[in-house]
Amino acid sequence: MRFARDILFIDMQTTGINPEKDFPLQISAVLLDKDNLLEKGSFTSYIKNPFSQTTNDRVVQALGIPREVLIKSPNLKAVLIAFKEKFSYNVTLASHNIINVNFLRESFRRTGIEYEYDYHVLELWTLAYMYLSKQNLKKIPTAETIGSYFKLQRKNERDSLENCRYYSEIFRQLVKRY
């Protein structure tokens, strides 16, 4: 199956699930070729936030990264500028859920950078739900249920780049079977 545009899978590690109140801690993306769904490029960055030392220590522990990595990370605006330079707006955004896209949009708004990505988004769990229903399986589509169905394993679910590659492989499997 060929797509009209390349597909950009995004994933974010955040302090919570509310894009208006919580903050991104890591942004990652994997760009898939529209013709063969092979990886064309990737991006990942942790984000330094103005949190208290106690909160930063909890973030480091939750993400399983060295403290120095978070401290030396660029701020949100610098990360988004690099992200925008790496990937054109002429892509179809994809994610395992719409919350990541909402976080990306809100991050652009917070930093005053114009968000120009198309509003059409591929939401992986909706596609997975349709596929599992078609197979007459009554499982809720999560990374674990659909990944295990396709016999896929993820090394570190707290790493956004690893998640993007994992979700991309689930997407490839779904496309192959449709």
Image: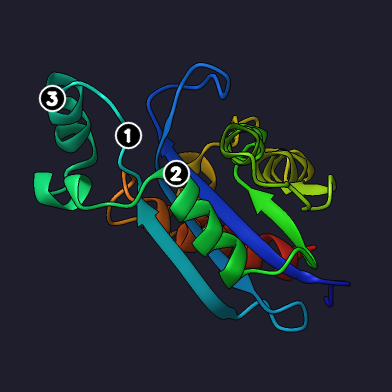
Cα distance between the residues tagged 1 and 3: 10 Å
Residue of label 1: 49
Farthest front residue in view = 112
On the question of residue 169 being in view, the answer is no
Residue of label 2: 76
User: With 127 as the anchor, is 68 left or right in this view?
Assistant: left
Cα distance between the residues tagged 3 and 2: 18 Å
| Viewport quadrant of the N terminus | bottom right
Cα distance between the residues tagged 2 and 1: 8 Å
Picture coordinates of residue 112 (x, y %)? 64, 39
Q: Specify the quadrant of the image occupied by residue 7.
A: bottom right
Q: Name which residue type carries label 1.
A: Asn
Sequence-wise first label, 3 or 2: 3
Q: Specify the quadrant of the image occupied by residue 139.
A: top right
Sequence-wise first label, 2 or 1: 1
Q: Name which residue type carries label 3.
A: Gln
User: With 107 as the anchor, is 159 left or right in this view?
Assistant: left
Write the residue at 57% across / 71% down: 86
